[in-house]
Amino acid sequence: MKLWQKSTEVNKAVDRFTVGRDRELDLYLAEADVLGSLAHTRMLESIGLMSTEDLEKVQQGLKEIYREIQEGRFTIDEGIEDVHSQVEFMLTERVGEAGKKIHSGRSRNDQVLVDLKIFLRKQVYEVAAHAEQLFGLLQELSERYKEVLMPGYTHLQIAMPSSFGLWFGAYAESLVDDMEMMLAAYKVCNKNPLGSAAGYGSSFPLNRTMTTRLLGFNELNYNVVYAQMGRGKTERIVAQALSSVAATLSRLAMDNCMFINQNFDFISYPAELTTGSSIMPHKKNPDVWELIRGKCNLIQALPNQITMLTTNLPGGYNRDLQLLKEVLFPAIADLMSCLEMAGYMLRNIIVKKDILKDKKYDYLFSVEVVNNMVLQGTPFREAYRQVGLSIENGTFVPVREVHHTHEGSIGNLCTKEVRAMMDEVMSAFHYEKVREAERLLVK
């Protein structure tokens, strides 16, 4: 029997359909669920809804369950609807009647809300930490290969000289802006909805400020109706942040797939990091980058999936929201694996030098020749015309020296300045506050 059930047995087909994948996906929320109950029961004792003796039993039981979750020994039994029910059943079985008191002053609605906020703020920070590691590697590669020139393209046509320093550095700086999005999502996740109950508050004199402090949240979701309305909106904002990182990774993956192609031949990878063909013995396929590109393209569709799932829902809780976990949780795991594999591949990249010595890249230097003429006094339009005519009649002679000195150019990558921007964003998470609050709850 379910915790909320009275005397009527739910039809088995309805039960299977409505529970869906909750038993599987709620395992992600198990740690968060126990943390929420540890804070909630301390608050209940502080307002006289739980005795000190019962609190001691409940806290001990919850901490024991928490350790089992961390050790991978926690499961949700067949016939039990969700993680909240499993934890309460286990607790009551171990500590007796005191376990039945932990639900006072809350609903499964605000219980799942606080679980999601605790879980998602951790996941957002972990994605950001993975992205920061990739950022550091990209900056290291940018500095290592800053003197190695490569073609730059517009419209996929040979355009102007670029460098591997610029290429790696561009994706590093792109991750800085992505982290701004992740930080915004983190701030939304780091607000406490506990105490909103079913979405309309409680007649118990709950101390929501206390649970906010105990759980390490930065502030409250104050309005209890909005706390419930935030379900779906929070996931959508997180999805938008994930999508931003995914867009950067997808584009980096495409460049790698293109540059390893024999017609470009700018980079290569050790044979063991590529795959072969069943009939073509010469093939070295960039399958890792292709899968990163594909997975990240799917993640970029995630905000739209969540938008379509939540569009035009009425106020209050609606069961549609259960489906959010099915699309969001796997996407987070996929993005983290993509970040890890991108780093693994880039640590083994082989950059080819002297690419621009090939005559087909002569015209890359046309702008350099025009600019040199301008520096010697020729008006820009005249210099442009003369160089254009020399290209048309086949007399163009490239000047293969590149002198770019302004901020962010080939000769002045501003690596330290970009690093400072990333440091500023990452320091704004203040995740140490969350770690300390959680440590104190379970100690």
Image (cartoon, rainbow, N blue to C red):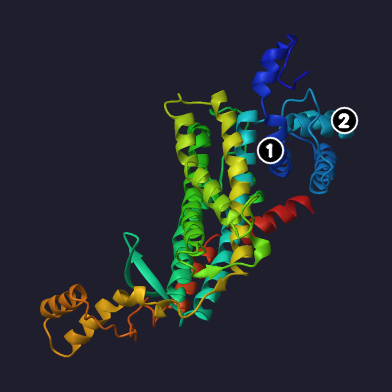
Q: Residues within 10 Å of mark 1 (few under 14, many from 20)?
A: few
Amino acid type of the residue that numbered disc 1 sits on in the rendered structure: Ile
Residue 126, compared with residue 76, is above or below; it is: below
Amino acid type of the residue that numbered disc 2 sits on in the rendered structure: Glu
Numbered disc total: 2
Q: Which residue shows up at 75% across the image and 29% down it? A: 85
> CA separation, marks 2 and 1?
25 Å
* Viewer-side residue, 102 vs 7: 7
Q: Look at mark 2 in the image and give the residue it sits on.
A: 93
Rendered image quadrant of residue 50: top right
Residue 376, compared with residue 164, is above or below; it is: below
Q: Look at mark 1 in the image and give the residue it sits on.
A: 47
The image shows residue 103 at horizontal and vertical percentages of 71, 30
Rendered image quadrant of residue 371: bottom left
Regarding residue 212, the answer to whether it shows in the image is no
Q: Which residue shows up at 60% across the image and 58% down it? A: 283
Badge 2 or badge 1: first in the primary sequence: 1
Image quarter in which the C terminus is found: bottom right
The answer to whether 347 appears left or right of 440 in the picture is: left
Q: Which residue shows up at 56% across the image and 61% down it? A: 131
* Viewer-side residue, 167 vs 386: 386
